[in-house]
Image: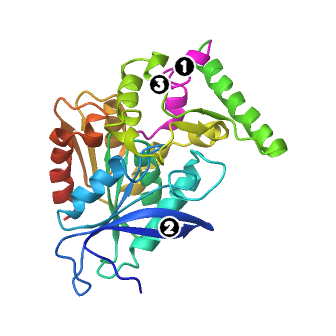
Amino acid sequence: MKKFTIGKNKVSFLSEKDKISGNLFLPKNYSQEKTYEAIVVVTPASGIKEQTAGIYAEKLASKGFITLAFDHRTYGESEGLPRGMENAPMKVEDIKNAISFIKTIPGVKGEISLLGICSGSGYSLQAAMFDGRVKRIAIVSAFIDFIDYGLSGATQYANELSGDKYNQFAQQMKMASDARQAYFETGEVKQCWGIPPRSENLGEFWGRAADYYLNPKRGGQYPTYSNMRATISLDTRYFFNPTEHMDLLKNKPFLIIVGEESMSFQISQIAYDKALGKKELVIVKKATHFDLYDQDEYVDQAIEKLTSFYK
């Protein structure tokens, strides 16, 4: 069996025959003879393990947990084609395989907890609903209802669309289906923005997204990150809405953390209202969506709440 060291360990595991690259964090008091709560941390859409998921995983490990952040298939250092596939069911399977992997680490207790960030919240919720190994789940800056998002008129493709929200949705589905046909016939992978440049002038949210993902001092500093997405995956992303079945989480403690000034505030409130059982909504004062990605002033507040929740 591989020997792990305290702190960050480079690891890999398989998800449907593709190799997944991850960073496993062990707490400073780690011993194979002890037992620890384990948390799988799920990245935002197009995010990689070194960005916000890695920040949360490392900080939570410092609180005594065993944590795992990983690159989904087709992203970062993980295998998988076509690159940049924002495929919701595929990502849920990756989470389940990450759970399988972390359960093999010596010292991990029987059941696993999840932490989803941004779109990773929706994927994590779906995994938690249909995986009996998940004990509890927390989400931060959540995006969950991707159907509503695709109809919102506020997507990163808004400058390329016209008409009412239904026409705009149909145009995006045509983008996806045209890309799918091209990939089938020629192998060409058409790409579109995952995070558009600030110059696209799409409003405050996307400006803040660019300031995180494209900023070389923040999420843009990692060479394995790309802000492009496979256009073919627009349809596989938009049909996904776990909020339709929030009642399935009734027996699993559920924590939502969201910034007071975040675009995701309303989304989080809807998920909270629909959930049954033990649940809590924590609002971080003055924080925006992306403040909770890497700004210690806000992230550390989230970490303190997550620590008490997972323990």
Question: What quarter of the picture does the C terminus occupy?
Answer: bottom left
Q: Position of residue 307 (x, y in %)?
A: 18, 58
Quarter assignment of residue 57? bottom left
Q: Which residue is mark 1?
A: 158
Residue nearest the observer in this picture, 188 or 164: 188
- The answer to whether any part of residue 130 appears in the image is no
Q: Residue furthest top?
A: 163
Residue receiving disc 2: 97
Residue type, numbered disc 3? Pro
Q: Is residue 39 above or below residue 122?
A: below
Circle 3 crowding by C-alpha within 10 Å: few under 14, some 14–19, many from 20: some
Q: Residue at x 62, y 20 (%)?
A: 168
- Which element carries disc 1, helix, strand or loop? helix
Q: Residue at x 47, y 43 (%)?
A: 45
Residue designated by label 3: 197
Q: Earlier in the sequence, mark 3 or mark 1?
A: 1
Task: Specify start and end residues of the magenta stretch as a single range.
Answer: 142-162
Task: Specify the color scheme.
Answer: rainbow
